[in-house]
């Protein structure tokens, strides 16, 4: 926990940006009987019945200090998909940075090993060497600021039915563009000093 909190306390460095990554799923549902459009003094209405069309995965990366985020919609959330997310992160999103300081949770797919599953060894090593890895502790995923951003995405964009992945991708892209344009930042206040007081039950009691 303190390792992640110390990362959040660093000053902004464009050559070593702190980037939080997380993922979520969205169940794809359509409304076979259609809906009624919005009218004066009457919100849009849709039938209670819906049809399931599987699920889609969303990878979200956010740079809290600059208010920059990106969301990518994929069919699955395998280690191969996460490896591709990391490649995009270092080769496209932060191609000019010396190293990306990555904060993620400790899922078994979130390790440098996923890169070796997806790419030749030399390419996997190149990508891994451009990442400084930091993991939230078990049951401590709330320390990942990408979870905060996913919560905003869920409330502002995902809280309605979407029947297919292409519509989901369009809606998410529009949300991403608008939120980036506003440069919405995450102002993290919780520090290691706070943790030692508020979560003192987690620390060894020295006699």
Image (tube, rainbow, N blue to C red):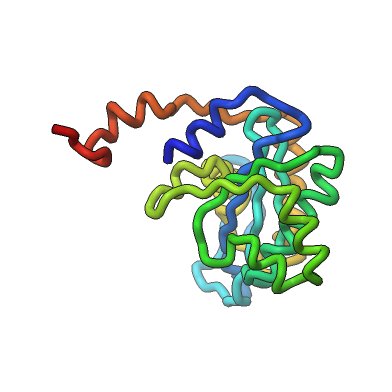
Residue occupying the point 78% across, 32% down: 15
Q: How many marks?
A: 0
Q: Is residue 168 above or below residue 76?
A: above
Residue occupying the point 55% across, 73% down: 50
Return the residue nearer the eye: 177 or 130: 130
Q: Is residue 37 above or below residue 16?
A: below
Furthest residue toward front: 207
Residue occupying the point 48% across, 33% down: 5
Q: Is residue 94 above or below residue 14?
A: below
Task: Report if residue 80 is visible in the image.
Answer: yes
Residue occupying the point 62% across, 68% down: 77
Q: How far from the left and from the top, in percent, is residue 74?
A: 70, 66
Instruction: Residue 191: name its quadrant.
Output: top left
Q: Quadrant of the N terminus?
A: top left
Q: How far from the left and from the top, in percent, is residue 112?
A: 65, 61
Task: Report if residue 43 is visible in the image.
Answer: no
Q: How far from the left and from the top, in percent, is residue 108?
A: 52, 66
Return the residue nearer the eye: 42 or 104: 104
Return the residue nearer the eye: 74 or 179: 74
Q: How far from the left and from the top, in percent, is residue 17?
A: 71, 35
- Is residue 192 left or right of 182 when viewed as pictured? left
Q: Quadrant of the C terminus?
A: top left
Return the residue nearer the eye: 161 or 110: 110
Instruction: Residue 179: name its quadrant.
Output: top right
Instruction: Residue 40: name its quadrant.
Output: top right
């Amino acid at each position: 926990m303190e390792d992640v909190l110390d990362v959040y306390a660093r000053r902004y460095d464009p050559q070593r940006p702190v980037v939080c990554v997380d993922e979520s799923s969205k169940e794809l549902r359509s409304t076979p009987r259609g809906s009624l459009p919005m009218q004066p003094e009457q919100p849009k209405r849709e039938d209670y019945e819906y049809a399931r069309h599987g699920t889609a995965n969303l990878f979200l990366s956010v740079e809290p200090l600059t208010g920059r985020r990106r969301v990518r919609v994929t069919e699955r959330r395998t280690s191969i998909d996460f490896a591709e997310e990391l490649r995009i992160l270092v080769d496209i999103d932060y191609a000019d940075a010396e190293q990306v300081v990555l904060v993620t949770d400790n899922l078994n797919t979130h390790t440098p090993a996923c890169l070796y599953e997806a790419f030749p060894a030399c390419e996997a090593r190149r990508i891994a060497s451009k990442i400084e890895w930091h993991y939230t502790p078990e049951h401590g995923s709330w320390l990942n600021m990408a979870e905060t951003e996913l919560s905003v995405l869920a409330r502002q964009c995902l809280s309605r039915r979407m029947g297919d992945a292409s519509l989901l991708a369009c809606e998410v892209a529009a949300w991403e563009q608008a939120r980036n344009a506003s440069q919405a930042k995450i102002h993290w206040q919780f520090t290691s000093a706070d943790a030692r007081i508020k979560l003192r039950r987690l620390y060894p009691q020295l006699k």
